[in-house]
Amino acid sequence: MVRKGLEKTTLEDIAQEAGQPRPLVRYFVGNRADLVSLLTERIVRRSEERLETLRKKCAQETEGDVVEWLFESFFSDDFSNRLVAELWHAAQRSDDLRRSVSEVYRRVLSEMAKHIARGEYGQRADTSRDTAYALFSASLGATVLRHLGVPPPHRGRHLRTLQGLTTAIGSKERVIKKRGRVR
């Protein structure tokens, strides 16, 4: 499916790849819509596993470590990234699929925001959600650019810049709180 894409992959292709007769694949997978549904469930399950890793990591790591984990682990699985890209494309035509995919991202953002709010920077809940969104967007964008053959010029500096943004947002908020002007 990754080679041809979701739109062009047939049950026959899957049967050949699995080394099984097409009727057997059809029996276990069903039709094309069922196949997309199974793929979505698999991606959601894998995302949930990654989200659990994020929860555990957030419990014991700094924001900088979480930023590094996003780049080095969460968005570094090329196979999953290609499947997710296929699902994004398919989600443009399916409200149910769009809801499933967006719910996973909402949960990841929520976990990140909770960690940022209770972390060393002590950001307010609304600011921590903005920070989580910015970091997630940057991670996602970097993944897309990397797949297009445009990696960051200096990966280490790229990570440190994003970690610095998290620190800067928290520092600015502390200064505003001290001055009594919380926005």
Image (cartoon, rainbow, N blue to C red):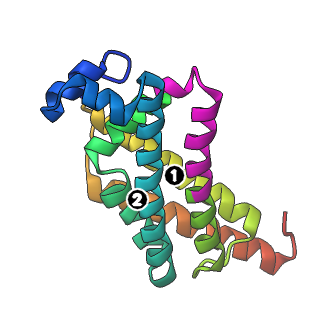
Q: In the image shown, does 29 or 139 lie closer to the viewer?
A: 29
Image spot of residue 26 (x, y percent): 33, 27
Which kind of residue does numbered mark 2 sit on?
Leu
Q: Residue at x 42, y 61 (%)?
A: 50
**Looking at numbered disc 1 in the image, what kind of residue is underneath it?**
Phe
Specify the segment rendered in magenta: 89-107
Label 2 Cα neighbours within 10 Å, binned few <14 / some 14-19 / many ≥20? some
Number of residue marks: 2
**On-image quarter of the N terminus:** top left
Is residue 43 within the magenta segment?
no
Task: Tell me if 14 is positioned left or right of 129 in this view.
Answer: left
Residue 80 in which image quadrant: top left
Point 57% across, 65% down: residue: 112
**Which label belongs to residue 136?**
1
Residue 152 visible in the current orientation: no
State the mark number for residue 76: none
Q: Residue furthest right?
A: 180
